[in-house]
Image (cartoon, rainbow, N blue to C red):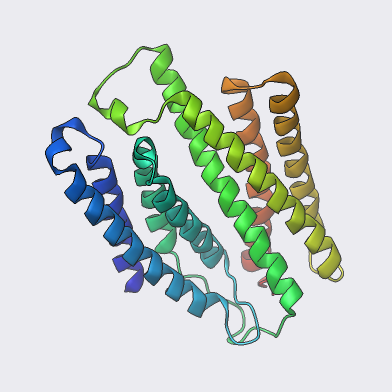
Amino acid sequence: MFQITILLSYLVAGAAFACSRLERFVSHSQAFLFAAVLLGLAGLVGHTAGLWTDILAGEGLSLTLADAASFIGLQLALIALLGALDAPLRGMSAALLALAGLAAALTGTGTPPVEQPDPVSWQLKAHVLISLFAYGLLTVGAIVAIYALMQDRRLRSATLSPASKLFAPLETTEKLLFSITTAGFAILAIAVVSGLAFVDNLFAQHLVHKTALSLVALLLFGVLLAGRRFAGWRGRRAIYLYLWGFAVLGLAYFGSRYVLEYVLGRTWG
């Protein structure tokens, strides 16, 4: 039941953020903003509490595919609320909160193969949570990249409407995308290194393909950052390269989770 409450909190908060940016609601923008922040924070607290109970089960780590998606949704909500501090980004915050709500609705819906997960070391717990943090951050980047493509298309077609207030300037969006890429690249690198150091016998745990795909994604993000730094890459070329890197990363993580959980009947941790 709490999943529905959190979903509604995020959806209403996102709608309020969007309304606070529209001209037709300008006289009530502060009221919409206050309601959005209040509901967003309430959803964030409830979401965190629910995930804490589901994931950190005793000395083990119970992390189903659904809970992994919900964990990423929690990051989307947090970044949405932080991004809303900058008025032009409140339209984007609305979209992030809607996605966070859908992810939160998945909390606890996966069925682990055992009632009580085996104890795991703090190093392994740290690796799993760092990996999820990296994936969540880069997921935000993918949404920002799609947002930038939409803005680029609107500018090319000279489409103007009241909804244009929901879009930040394209240059601002691109700067945000590369800031996220830089942070995500660094955290993903830490996740890959910690996995190689702390995960015993990758072959036995069927995680070789996950590691290989993560390294490919890391390489693509590295090429993107190098191209930006030394060749000034921007626009569609940079956005599409980011999305390719994210697609490989999604296949690495969620593809692996699906195979382990639904094909092999296992969870990792």
Q: Nearer the viewer, residue 253 or 112?
A: 253
Q: Which quadrant does the N terminus fall into?
A: bottom left
Residue at image location 49% in from the left, 33% down from the top: 146
Q: Is 231 placed left or right of 17 in the picture?
A: right
Q: Can residue 108 be seen at all in this image of the molecule?
A: no
Residue 120 locus on image (x, y percent): 72, 81
Q: Quadrant of residue 178?
A: top right
147 up-or-down from 152: above or below: below
Return the residue found at the far left: 27
Count of marks, rendered view? 0
Q: Which quadrant does the C terminus fall into?
A: bottom right
Q: Is 207 placed left or right of 172 in the picture?
A: right
Q: Can residue 127 be seen at all in this image of the molecule?
A: yes
Q: Nearer the viewer, residue 218 or 184?
A: 184
153 up-or-down from 112: above or below: above
Residue at image location 52% in from the left, 46% down from the top: 140
Residue 46 locus on image (x, y percent): 37, 71
Residue 11 locus on image (x, y percent): 30, 53
117 up-or-down from 250: above or below: below
Q: Nearer the viewer, residue 107 or 152?
A: 152
Q: Quadrant of residue 124?
A: bottom right
Residue at image location 59% in from the left, 42% down from the top: 180
Q: Nearer the viewer, residue 204 or 26?
A: 26
Residue 83 locus on image (x, y percent): 43, 46
Residue at image location 69% in from the left, 73% down from the top: 125
